[in-house]
Image: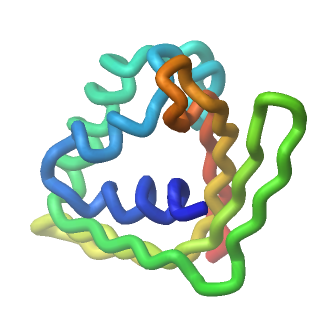
């Protein structure tokens, strides 16, 4: 399932719609917020992209895990990241947690997402 990897890599694009397309119309858990709409996620990502205009994300091979429970799919993926602003550079590793379901058109959409920084 390359869905999570595609979502992670889409964060490198300057176009927030590249990541936004993966979300359900309302996401029950968006990091520390609940019931976030796609437009709220877009606004959040726009702010993040302005703060960190250069972003690099690399999924770490062998860390992808998936578990199905009814109509929900739970996906985890560890990735390394680097973000750069004109004044600062940060990097580390994080574990992404996605809750995914099939949409009415048969595609997949993220209904919950969180991240745990590893280092």
Q: How many numbered marks are there?
A: 0
Toward the right, the furthest residue is: 69
Q: Position of residue 49 (x, y in %)?
A: 22, 48
Toward the front, the furthest residue is: 106
Residue drawn at x 32%, y 57% is 10
Q: Is residue 24 left or right of residue 112?
A: left
45 versus 6 height, above or below: above
Quadrant position of residue 75: bottom right
Quadrant position of residue 9: bottom left
User: 117 or 73: which is nearer to us?
Assistant: 73
Residue drawn at x 19%, y 66% is 54
Residue drawn at x 84%, y 45% is 68
Q: Position of residue 107 (x, y in %)?
A: 50, 35
22 versus 11 height, above or below: above
Residue drawn at x 69%, y 39% is 99
Q: Position of residue 61 (x, y in %)?
A: 61, 86
> Where, quadrant-wise, is the C terminus in this rendering?
bottom right
Q: Position of residue 103 (x, y in %)?
A: 55, 24
Quadrant position of residue 98: top right
């Amino acid at each position: 399932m390359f869905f999570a990897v595609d979502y992670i890599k889409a964060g490198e694009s300057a176009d927030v719609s590249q990541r936004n397309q993966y979300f359900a119309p309302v996401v029950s858990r968006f990091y520390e917020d609940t019931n976030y709409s796609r437009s709220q996620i877009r606004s959040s990502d726009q702010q993040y992209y302005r703060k960190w205009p250069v972003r690099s994300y690399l999924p770490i091979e062998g860390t992808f895990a998936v578990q199905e429970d009814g109509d929900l799919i739970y996906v985890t993926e560890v990735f390394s990241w680097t973000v750069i602003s004109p004044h600062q550079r940060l990097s580390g590793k994080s574990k992404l947690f996605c809750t995914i379901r099939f949409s009415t058109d048969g595609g997949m959409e993220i209904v919950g997402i969180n991240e745990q920084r590893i280092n």
